[in-house]
Amino acid sequence: MSNGQGFLHEMLGGIAAFAQHHLAEHRFNQERLALMREAIEQVVDASEPRIRLVGNYTEKLLDAVEIALRHSEGILRRLPPALTLSRRTWAADPRVNAFFATAGDLRSALSLDPSIQAFFKDGDPAECFALMLMVKRETATFGMALQGDMLVREIPQTVVSFSHHQLFFPTASETGLRRELRQRTLIFLATRALERINELRAGRSDLEEQRRQLQAQLRALRGHARGLQPMLLSADADATRQAALDQRLTQTEQDLAAARKQLGTLDDYLEQVRQVLSQPETYLQIRPLSLRLNRLGVKLDANSPEPGETIGLFEMTSLEMQRIGALVRFARDELLPESAF
């Protein structure tokens, strides 16, 4: 084979390999898209449906939706198994005992929740799984504690209590609950994207109104200059005020131009959604939380000789909001009879 033929053969082989690689990559992306299409459509519905008018919007959102779902799955893997809530576990499990002041409080929290009532009325299930969120309060006080072999009074202590128990997403199995939380997390992030879009819209409207007011003030100032105003105020005062208004107007117009670029086209709307879903940890974090408490709810140091139990739960944080949570399960028998409420 001549050098020319060898070069041609090598070039054609390279082209064929490139085409095969490109085809394999295209097939892989199509498979990814088929798996993610339903999730992408849920994101679009919850954020800005008009971005469906953007060409290849599903492909443009694919990576971001995958990132958001991986974040959700990572969160769910860190959540401990569902905690059983019952009168028996209130007496035996330090976590349940810490969450509720009495077994009666536990039964009331389960029984008075409308979503739990509706769940047990639909299909007559025997057991419920749900996400329980609470508010944790730490109160500084004084009490008694062991120091060595001595019982010492008036020792500064921190009492931990939990209140405002709420139950979400009741389902018939823990697998179903985790699946529901995965989907809800994705919708939550899409809603954050919608809030971001609305903030940008509101900011743009505020700048447009500010520009209109500044323009009106400048027109009035120039109109006064053609009337009797120069007889009442010095020219220097008018010039100073006009210069300040001109400067503010220039800055406002620059800010407005930048704001309009952020939402100038539907591609910009899509980009806002993509940015939020690509940075899910900015908008939703769940961290393990460990506390060592005695039976009275007093927080203990790790090296304290006083008897206590370490309880594990998780803290959910979204921007400025924080809640304490746990996955829970409980039987229908733990609810109070309807005649009791």
Image: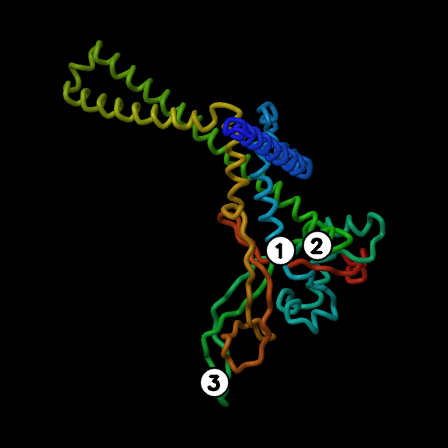
Q: Of label 2 and label 3, which has the lower sequence position?
A: 2
**Tag 1 residue:** 133
**Tag 3 residue:** 147
Q: Of label 1 and label 3, which has the lower sequence position?
A: 1
Q: For the residue marked with disc 3, what is the amino acid?
A: Gln
Q: In front: 84, or 237?
A: 84
Residue 332 rendering spot, x and y as whole percentages: 80, 59
Q: In front: 106, or 76?
A: 76
At numbered mark 3, what does the secondary structure look like: helix, strand or loop?
strand
At numbered mark 2, what does the secondary structure look like: helix, strand or loop?
strand
At numbered mark 1, what does the secondary structure look like: helix, strand or loop?
strand
Residue 71 rendering spot, x and y as whole percentages: 58, 48
Q: How is the image coloured?
A: rainbow
Q: For the residue marked with disc 2, what is the amino acid?
A: Ala
For the residues bearing labels 1 and 2, Cβ distance under 8 angstroms:
no
Q: Using a 10 Å C-alpha cutoff, classify the residue at mark 1 as few (fewer than 14 neighbours), some (14 to 19) or many (20 or more).
A: many
Q: CA distance from mark 1 to mark 3?
A: 36 Å
Q: Is residue 285 left or right of residue 37?
A: left
In this rendering, the answer to whether 151 lies above or below 300 is below
**Tag 2 residue:** 130
Q: Is residue 41 left or right of residue 305?
A: right
Q: In front: 253, or 142?
A: 253
In this rendering, the answer to whether 35 lies above or below 312 is above
